[in-house]
Amino acid sequence: MATTGEKAAARKKSALSALVGGLVGAAGISALFTLAGPELLKAMGPSRLALAGIGAIYALIAAFLGFGLLAPRTGAKLLNVGDADELRDERSSLSLSASFMGAFGIALILLALARGPGFTAGVVAPGAAMAVLTAVLVVGIAATWRWRGRMDELNHQLGLEGGAWAFGLSALLLTVWGAAASVGWAVLTAIDVIAVLAAMMLLGSFVAIGLRGMMAR
């Protein structure tokens, strides 16, 4: 059982990780939107901006994981892991996760910037955005299927619980939002649906981890 000192140190580490992650995330998203320019941002509208922001969060998480794998000692101080040895032991699975999250984040950003109905100012060809997203999903599913037998019981259970939370939260939010849209109280677009699903996948994972008391380690 963890001592009071160990719990305090874990909370301090979690707070530091959240602070650094928040600052880096805010800076990264701000830089992304600055590069886009005010005219493009205005043309994108809230839905596409939200999708691009979610994609940036995926990419930043992947960058943090990649940094932790390259520099385990420093990474262990920032990431939600026990120590540097855990990063070394989990290198294969974490590398797979980081690669997928980075690629998925980029695919979401490209989709947010792709031309479409009502968004002729898009700077990415629709076919290119769809090709990248499809490739990322296909490769991700294939890799997950291939690696399913190498996951330990805890990670397997966390994956199931995170998926269940993601599905439940997505179903709840999209049902209410869709119902409101059906009676003219709101607007629900395809971009909104994708943004909600992508965001809930992340949130579901955090909920599953948090409920097991693994947010502070």
Image: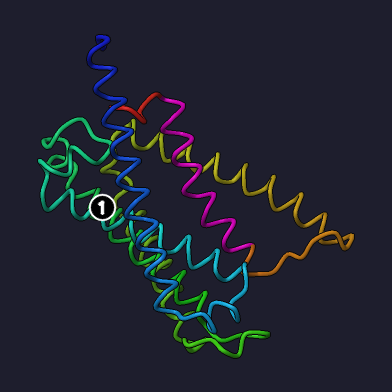
Image location (x, y in percent) of residue 43: 60, 81
Q: Secondary structure at mark 1?
A: helix
Q: Is residue 69 left or right of residue 128?
A: left
Closer-to-camera residue (14/192)? 14
Closer-to-camera residue (184/139)? 184
Closer-to-camera residue (10/146)? 10
Query: Residue tagged by mark 1?
Result: 64
Q: Is residue 156 magenta?
A: no
Quarter of the rendering occupied by the C terminus:
top left
Q: Which quarter of the picture shows residue 151?
A: top left
In the displayed structure, 11 sits above or below 75; it is: above
For disc 1, the neighbor class at 10 Å (few under 14, some 14 to 19, many from 20) is some
Image location (x, y in percent) of residue 39: 54, 84
Which colour assignment does the render follow? rainbow
In the displayed structure, 20 sits above or below 60; it is: above
Numbered marks: total: 1
Q: Which quarter of the picture shows residue 98?
A: bottom left
Q: Is residue 199 magenta?
A: yes
Task: Name the magenta segment's main secondary structure.
Answer: helix
In the displayed structure, 147 sits above or below 151; it is: below
Instruction: Tell me the residue at 33%/31% (across/down).
Output: 153
Instruction: Tell me the residue at 19%/42% (across/down).
Output: 90
Residue furthest out toward the right = 183
Which residues, given as a range, are shown in magenta? 193-212
Instruction: Tell me the residue at 50%/42% (across/down).
Output: 204
Quarter of the rendering occupied by the N terminus:
top left
Image location (x, y in percent) of residue 73: 10, 40
Q: Is residue 70 left or right of residue 161?
A: left
Image location (x, y in percent) of residue 183: 89, 60
Instruction: Tell me the residue at 45%/77% (across/down).
Output: 110
Looking at the rendered structure, the kind of residue marked 1 is Phe
